[in-house]
Image (cartoon, rainbow, N blue to C red):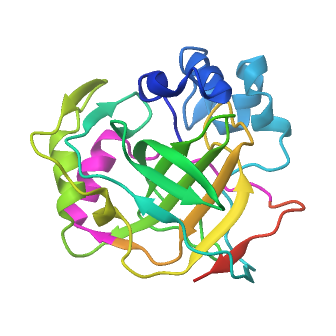
Amino acid sequence: MMLDRRALLLGLLSCPICASLARAAEGPHWSFEGADGPAHWGDLDPGFKACAVGSEQSPIDLKGAIKADFGRAALDWKPQAYAVVNNGHTIQANAKPGSFARVGGETYALQQFHFHAPSEHAIDGVRTAMEVHFVHSRAGGQLAVIGAFMKAGAANAAFATVMKAAPRHVGEQTLERPIDPHQLIPAKSAIYRYEGSLTTPPCAEVVDWNVFERPVEVAASAITAFRAIYPMNARPLQPLNRRFVLIGR
């Protein structure tokens, strides 16, 4: 899961962890492979230490989940003409104020959503073609991320529109018309919940993860378009350690 400086400007004053993430976005270069890839993130900057020594890191294999009745996240996302950004690590859609998620009795404001290929999370060791992360924040620094697996299938108007506008190089393009982000999550699905971290530096362990079990379908051509820009931008799976994964409907 990624957060960049532009996506967080509106929340910096009320979200201390967001301010630190914005500074991290301007810090050392990191990538998904080679000398500055995931195995070395913790060595690139003191602020990235959690990437190497954290005990509640993400993503994980969502296996062995325990059935629980924790209630569904209530999503109040407004259709918008999002600003679509290529930030050097992913394609991201920055949200205007006014969209929210209520998770675990707390209300979080939608900051942005972005994509990974292949999916970062897995189910019983199996990853799908892509994954979308909807990043929300609340005062105090806690984050809630709604994730959905993506697979090739029927065309998805929202994703197609984002990819049509997506800059091929670092830059920004505002959509010509609003899209409904609800199109990027499955209509009906169980959901996994666990406590984890950002999946990119600084790997802060401040995330309430909520990942839909069922994938959403998008056109194979749209996946190809994304992977032409970012062939691989997923962190390796992390140990579960002493955490529990819950699943509820």
Say which quarter of the image contains residue 217: bottom left
Q: Residue 242 occupies which quadrant of the picture?
A: bottom right
Task: Give x and y (percent) for residue 201.
Answer: 64, 31
Considering every residue shown, the one lying at the far left of the view is 176
Q: Is residue 26 above or below residue 216?
A: above
Q: x, y percentage for residue 50?
A: 79, 34
Q: Position of residue 114 (x, y in %)?
A: 41, 45
Q: Is residue 53 left or right of residue 93?
A: right
Q: Which quarter of the figure has residue 191?
A: bottom right
Relative image position of residue 158 (x, y in whole percent):
22, 57
Which quarter of the image is occupied by the N terminus?
Answer: top right
Decide which of 61, 56 is in the foreground and name it.
Answer: 56
- Give the number of callouts: 0
Residue situated in front as seen by the camera: 217 or 152: 217
Q: Is residue 87 left or right of residue 168?
A: right
Q: For this rendering, which residue is in front, 37 or 81?
A: 81
Q: Is residue 2 visible?
A: yes
**Identity of the residue drawn at 42% across and 74% down:** 215
In this picture, residue 192 sits left or right of residue 117 = right
* Observer-nearest of 34 and 74: 74
Magenta span covers which residues? 217-239
Residue 237 forms part of the magenta stretch: yes
Up/down of 33 relative to 171, above or below: below
Image quadrant in which the C terminus is located: bottom right
Residue at x 57% of width, y 73% of height: 126
Which residue is painted at 18% across and 55% down in the image? 160
- Indicate yes or no whether the magenta region holds residue 11: no
